[in-house]
């Protein structure tokens, strides 16, 4: 079982190391790390075509050898699946330091790198931890154990074609997590604001700022589950066709 581990926070991120350690615990697992050389949070699904990609050797904090690239998280997966590494059986991404719920999945490099795996015909698993915003250094031990258990079940049972799993984990000790729920995407409430400032030459520049997003507290959703102390496992599919709306469009006079 050859497992590729990547993320969107960069090769030095502590969540990546925690995920690597968790995957090493799986039976007969060979783990390869290929991650971006910088933070690509909220990068979405990127494929770099207009310039060459560089890949360098790196080392994680515990001495684990890794590969790192100037490409995006999804580029990391594409490089591996196209032959940069030995053939890959499973792609795991994360552990992201904040939850990826609701519409976040379209922005998240963590989730979209798992999507890239599915496009390449390989199971993809994304892991995110709902870390408190005021925490200087997160503890990924519980999240790592959850990731190991989810990966173990996927290796045993497989995933349907075109489906990936997005797992969101509450920031709790393992013995305080209430269990696991299979959920649907919830509804994020974004509180973005446009911040306008001037550089020293008087030219305006802009930040997309604002408060941290919240969500609607609905029991069977990802946001609802993690806020009640459960691990949320959401099956996502690449086919985003709005099937229920198709007939209404067919009724138009085209």
Image (cartoon, rainbow, N blue to C red):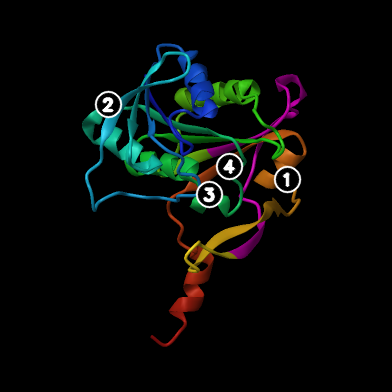
Considering only order in the chain, which callout, 4 or 3, is on the residue closer to the N terminus? 3
Residue 60 visible here: yes
Image mark for residue 224? 1
Note whether 49 is above or below 163 in the view shown.
below
Which residue: 72% across, 34% down?
Answer: 230
Image mark for residue 105? 3
Considering only order in the chain, which callout, 4 or 1, is on the residue closer to the N terminus? 1
The 10 Å Cα crowd at callout 3, few under 14, some 14 to 19, many 20 or more, is many
Which residue: 45% across, 44% down?
Answer: 40
Task: Verify whether residue 187 appears in magenta.
Answer: yes
Considering only order in the chain, which callout, 1 or 3, is on the residue closer to the N terminus? 3
x, y percent for residue 96: 55, 36
Which residue: 43% across, 39% down?
Answer: 114
Q: Report the magenta residues as a range.
A: 166-195
Circles 1 and 4, Cβ within 8 Å, touching? The answer is: no
Q: Which is in the foreground here, disc 3 or disc 4?
A: 3
Q: Which is in the foreground here, disc 2 or disc 3?
A: 3
Q: Is residue 29 left or right of residue 101?
A: left
Image mark for residue 234? 4
């Amino acid at each position: 079982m050859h497992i590729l581990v990547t993320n969107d926070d960069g090769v030095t991120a502590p969540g990546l190391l925690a995920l690597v350690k968790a995957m090493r615990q799986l039976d007969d697992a060979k783990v390869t790390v290929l991650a971006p050389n910088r933070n690509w949070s909220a990068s979405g699904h990127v494929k770099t075509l207009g310039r060459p990609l560089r890949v360098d050797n790196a080392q994680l904090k515990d001495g684990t050898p890794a590969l790192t690239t100037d490409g995006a998280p999804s580029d990391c997966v594409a490089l591996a699946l196209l032959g940069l590494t030995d053939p890959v059986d499973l792609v795991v991404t994360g552990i992201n330091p904040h939850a990826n719920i609701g519409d976040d999945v379209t922005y998240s490099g963590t989730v979209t790198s798992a999507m890239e795996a599915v496009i390449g015909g390989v199971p993809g698993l994304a892991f995110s931890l709902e870390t408190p915003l005021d925490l200087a250094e997160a503890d990924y031990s519980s999240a790592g154990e959850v990731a190991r258990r989810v990966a173990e079940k996927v290796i045993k049972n497989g995933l349907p074609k075109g489906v990936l799993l997005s797992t969101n984990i509450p920031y709790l000790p393992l013995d305080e997590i209430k269990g696991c729920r299979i959920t649907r995407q919830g509804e994020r409430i974004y509180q973005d604001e446009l911040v306008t400032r001037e550089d020293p030459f008087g030219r305006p520049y802009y930040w997309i700022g604002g408060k941290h997003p919240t969500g609607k507290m609905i029991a069977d959703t990802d946001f609802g589950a993690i806020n009640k102390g459960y691990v949320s496992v959401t099956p996502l599919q690449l086919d985003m066709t709005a099937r229920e709306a198709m007939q209404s469009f067919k009724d138009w006079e085209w």
